[in-house]
Image (cartoon, rainbow, N blue to C red):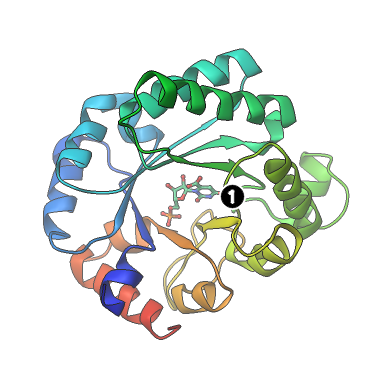
Amino acid sequence: MNIFEQAAGRLMVALDCPTVEQARQLIDTLEGIPCYMKVGMQLYYSEGPDFVRELKDRGYSVFLDLKMHDIPNTVKNGAFSITSLGVDMFNVHAAGGLKMMKAAKEGVLEAMAASPALKQPILIGVTQLTSTDQTMLNEELGIPGTVEQSVVSYALLTKEAGLDGVVASPLEVQAIKSACGKDFKTVTPGIRPAGSAAGDQSRTLTPLEAMQQGTDYIVVGRPIISAPSPREAALQIIEEMKQAW
Ligand SMILES: O=C(O)c1cc(=O)[nH]c(=O)n1[C@@H]1O[C@H](COP(=O)(O)O)[C@@H](O)[C@H]1O
């Protein structure tokens, strides 16, 4: 695998589109770029599992970002269904607690036992959303301490539950890796190439900075999908990522 392919494989494009037609158009413009595709609530709630199957048929690695957060039994059954779909990665909220995250893992393992041909998906816990800042954490959510402390404590809980890694901002990658080990995966949204609008993201770094922090995957939505040329924007981000090699 050359460096372009290695970098592209660590770029997750958030297909945050209202319709399957728009998502297909976006994917067509990215043809030949071997990136991960992230399907989130907007597309999944309107198009359902068929669109995920379509992406798998087209050969993409798929991150299904539905951020489950419910009672353990419900999350276990949800994880069974998601795993049976054949996705490569999915997530649950670490705030659901240890029992809930362990239940998610059980759902994965039961789905694997029922369909041994499946590849086991990477299971990730969401720590503090990248839109959350220090004031919001302390004053709205009532969680004391720094954002980094809260993220690391959720990361340790996620590891204890047997999950594979966490979603966090790239600013916390080093602290997560030193607490949980370098093989514990970090998936980092909150990526903003220089000069692009932060929008609702609070904890951001550029693609190069995020890679230099040692993150495993970067998640990018609007800086690609709202660009005049999404293909050019994605290629530019991959070029930037390559500088970290
Ligand atoms: O789980 C996620 O993917 C996620 C977690 C998080 O803390 N922050 C976050 O932005 N995301 C997702 O990452 C994507 C970021 O999109 P942009 O802000 O447009 O680049 C969106 O699809 C979010 O739903």
Instruction: Tell whether 140 sits left or right of 192.
Output: right
Residue 99 x/y as whole percent: 72, 25
Which amino acid type corresponds to the residue marked 1 in the rendered image? Gly
Secondary structure, mark 1, is strand
Quadrant of the rendering where the N terminus is positioned: bottom left
Residue at (59, 74) in percent of width and height: 213
**Figure quadrant of residue 120:** top left
Residue at (53, 53) in percent of width and height: 200
Residue 56 visible in the snapshot: yes
**Figure quadrant of residue 5:** bottom left
10 Å neighbourhood of mark 1: few (<14), some, or many (≥20)? many
Instruction: Tell whether 51 sits left or right of 14.
Output: left
Q: Along the line of sight, which residue is nearer the eye, 100 or 26?
A: 100
Residue 136 visible in the snapshot: no
Residue at (30, 78) in percent of width and height: 3
Tell me: is circle 1 under 8 Å from ligand 1. no
Q: Along the line of sight, which residue is nearer the eye, 140 or 111?
A: 111
Q: Along the line of sight, which residue is nearer the eye, 243 or 135?
A: 243
Residue at (59, 49) in percent of width and height: 165
Residue bearing mark 1: 165
Q: Along the line of sight, which residue is nearer the eye, 243 or 3?
A: 3
Instruction: Tell whether 30 sits left or right of 115.
Output: left
Counting the numbered discs, the total is 1
Residue 75 x/y as whole percent: 56, 21
Quadrant of the rendering where the C terminus is positioned: bottom left
